[in-house]
């Protein structure tokens, strides 16, 4: 489920790569669909493919480091349109949820130099922000943020500031582990083991208004939604060593509901979803 390179060549000193032709990115599709959430059945199939794709990288000692909805493309982004009465708007439903992972420009092998900062801001894990070193688990955190975005239509951590980012994490996921706080060189963010933060400031009020415990974002009180949030919680574990691996994630109960044809990494259609 990684993009296929067909050819490469040099043109006037420029290295060029020819890839297979794919559809729109999952970000562009959701943007053009008024940021409406994907159905959970579609998210399940997309996640199953994503986990296999990134597990393939991890098995080969490679970390993608820049996973985000823009770097996940539909093989074919054709869609059907129907009226969503609850939202009072037209909604698009992609016909085929087969996806491919793209953009390996920042991908890093285990033996290669690991730059201090990796991952696009909104999908950046705490160990990167705190400069504690990173490895394959950083991809798992990014995938957790992506799946949340598919589920809600909103970015989990909508910020451009390290301190605010860490505060948002604590509001949504609970306190950072003490060992991470005391091990980081970024002590300017902390005082006596607590984040330095003014909740009465404009930024403080913004975070209080927009960031809530992860479980409160659950759309339905059903077993499959509970399974999804349990998986998210394990992917968004602060400690990289305790964070679920993709091999473990693929055995999570959330994927028990996949149909046999989906386990073969086949396509998913709107017609299938309505059954």
Image (cartoon, rainbow, N blue to C red):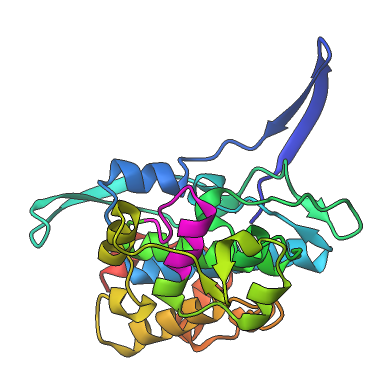
Specify the segment rendered in magenta: 155-169
* Residue 138 visible in rendering: yes
**The furthest residue to the top:** 12
Residue at the limit of the structure toward the front, as seen here:
192
Q: How far across and down, in percent of the image, does residue 70 sit?
A: 50, 45
Residue 79 located left or right of residue 137? left
Residue 45 higher or lower than 193, as above or below: above
Most foreground residue, 240 or 95: 240
Of the pair 185 and 57, the residue shown nearer to us: 185
- In the rendered image, the vertical position of residue 62 relative to residue 90, given as above or below: below
Residue 4 x, y percent position in the rendering: 70, 44
Q: Residue at x 43, y 65 (%)?
A: 168
Q: Is residue 158 magenta?
A: yes
**Residue 44 screen position, x and y as percent:** 45, 71
Horizontal side, residue 23 vs residue 270: left or right: right
Q: Quadrant of the C terminus?
A: bottom left
In the rendered image, residue 233 lying in the magenta stretch gets the answer no
**Image coords of residue 95 (percent x, y):** 36, 53
Image side of residue 259 versus residue 264, left or right = left
- The structure residue drawn at horizontal position 32% and vertical position 63%, both measured from the top left corner, is 152
Q: Observer-nearest residue: 115 or 28? A: 115
Total marks in image: 0
State the residue at coordinates (59%, 76%).
Answer: 238
Q: Quadrant of residue 65?
A: bottom right
From this viewpoint, is residue 98 visible? Answer: no
Q: Quadrant of residue 9?
A: top right
Residue that protrudes farthest toward the right in the picture:
111
Q: Residue at x 43, y 59 (%)?
A: 157
Q: Split into 4 quadrants, where in the image is the N terminus? A: bottom right
| Residue sitting nearer the eye, 203 or 113 | 203
Q: In the rendered image of this protein, does residue 228 appear above or below residue 262?
A: below
């Amino acid at each position: 489920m990684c993009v296929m390179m067909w050819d490469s060549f040099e043109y006037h000193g420029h290295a060029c790569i020819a890839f297979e032709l794919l559809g729109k990115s999952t970000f562009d599709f959701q943007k053009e669909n008024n940021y409406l959430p994907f159905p959970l059945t579609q998210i399940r199939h997309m996640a199953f493919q994503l986990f296999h794709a990134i597990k393939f990288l991890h098995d080969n000692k490679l970390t993608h480091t820049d996973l985000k909805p823009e770097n996940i493309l539909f093989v074919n982004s054709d869609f059907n349109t129907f009226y969503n009465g609850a939202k009072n708007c037209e909604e698009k439903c992609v016909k085929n949820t087969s996806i491919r992972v793209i953009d390996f420009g920042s991908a890093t092998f285990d033996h290669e130099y690991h730059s201090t900062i990796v991952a696009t801001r909104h999908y950046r894990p705490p160990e990167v922000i705190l400069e504690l070193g990173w490895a394959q688990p950083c991809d798992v955190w990014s995938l957790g943020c992506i799946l949340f975005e598919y589920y809600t239509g909103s970015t989990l951590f909508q910020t451009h500031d390290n301190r605010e980012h860490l505060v948002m994490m604590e509001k949504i996921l609970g306190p950072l582990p003490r060992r991470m706080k005391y091990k980081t060189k970024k002590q300017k963010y902390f005082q006596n083991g607590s984040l330095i933060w003014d909740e009465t400031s404009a930024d403080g009020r913004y975070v209080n208004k927009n960031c809530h415990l992860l479980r409160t974002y659950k759309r339905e009180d059903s077993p499959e939604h509970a399974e999804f949030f349990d998986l998210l919680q394990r992917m968004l574990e602060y400690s990289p060593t305790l964070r679920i691996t993709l091999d473990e994630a693929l055995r999570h109960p959330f994927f028990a509901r996949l149909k046999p044809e989906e386990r073969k990494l086949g396509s998913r259609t709107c017609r299938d979803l309505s059954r």
